[in-house]
Image (cartoon, grey):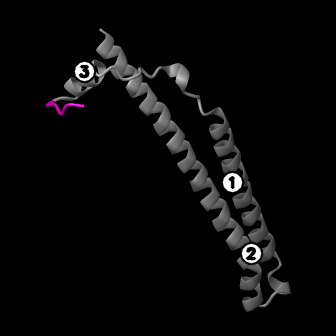
Amino acid sequence: MVAADSGQDVIRADKKNHLPKVTASHYADYGTARFVASFLAFVGWLCVVISLLWALVTFSEVPRYGSGEKYMALLPSLILFIAGIVQVAGSQMMRAVVDTATYTRNILENIERRCDM
């Protein structure tokens, strides 16, 4: 590939070298990855809700626990809360990667259309 001053010149150089044209039919729509990300987000938010309910139940039983025991009883709900938030963040990162791949494919298709004109 020949280095050029503009991106258009680089694309033309690639076309002169007869590189295989990549079309949209070669790509998937990442439906499975989107489903998995949505499912992980749902499970993560479910963990957050359960942890908050668990903390409320623990606080409602204040007379039953002493001050140190109350905080120790809150520890599992805090861990579940953090795990849920991390899971939601992971699913959002997964969606971001899939969206980036989709938008990159759209950019490639637009560049190929412009070169065909």
Between the C-alphas of marks 1 and 2, the distance is: 16 Å
Count of residue discs: 3
**N-term-proximal mark, 1 vs 2:** 1
> Does residue 108 appear left or right of residue 39 in this picture?
left
* Residue at the left extreme, as displayed: 5
Q: Nearer the viewer, residue 26 or 117?
A: 26
Query: In the image, residue 21 lies at what x, y percent?
Result: 41, 20
**N-term-proximal mark, 3 vs 1:** 3
Which residue bears the numbered disc 1?
45
Give the residue displayed 73% in from the left and 52% down from the top. Answer: 43
Question: Magenta residues, as a range?
Answer: 1-5
Give the residue displayed 67% in from the left and 36% down from the top. Answer: 32
Which residue bears the numbered disc 3?
12
Query: In the image, residue 116 lies at what x, y percent?
Result: 32, 11
Give the residue displayed 50% in from the left and 37% down from the top. Answer: 99
For the N terminus, give its image quadrant: top left
**N-term-proximal mark, 3 vs 2:** 3
Q: Is residue 15 above or below residue 35?
A: above
- Label annotation for residue 76: 2
Q: Nearer the viewer, residue 54 or 17?
A: 17
Between the C-alphas of marks 3 and 1, the distance is: 49 Å
Q: Nearer the viewer, residue 89 or 61?
A: 89
The three-letter code of the residue at mark 3 reads Arg
Secondary structure category for the residue under label 1: helix
Examine the structure image and report whether residue 3 is included in the region drawn in magenta.
yes
The three-letter code of the residue at mark 1 reads Trp
Query: In the image, residue 80 lies at what x, y percent?
Result: 71, 67
Query: In the image, residue 63 lies at what x, y percent?
Result: 83, 85
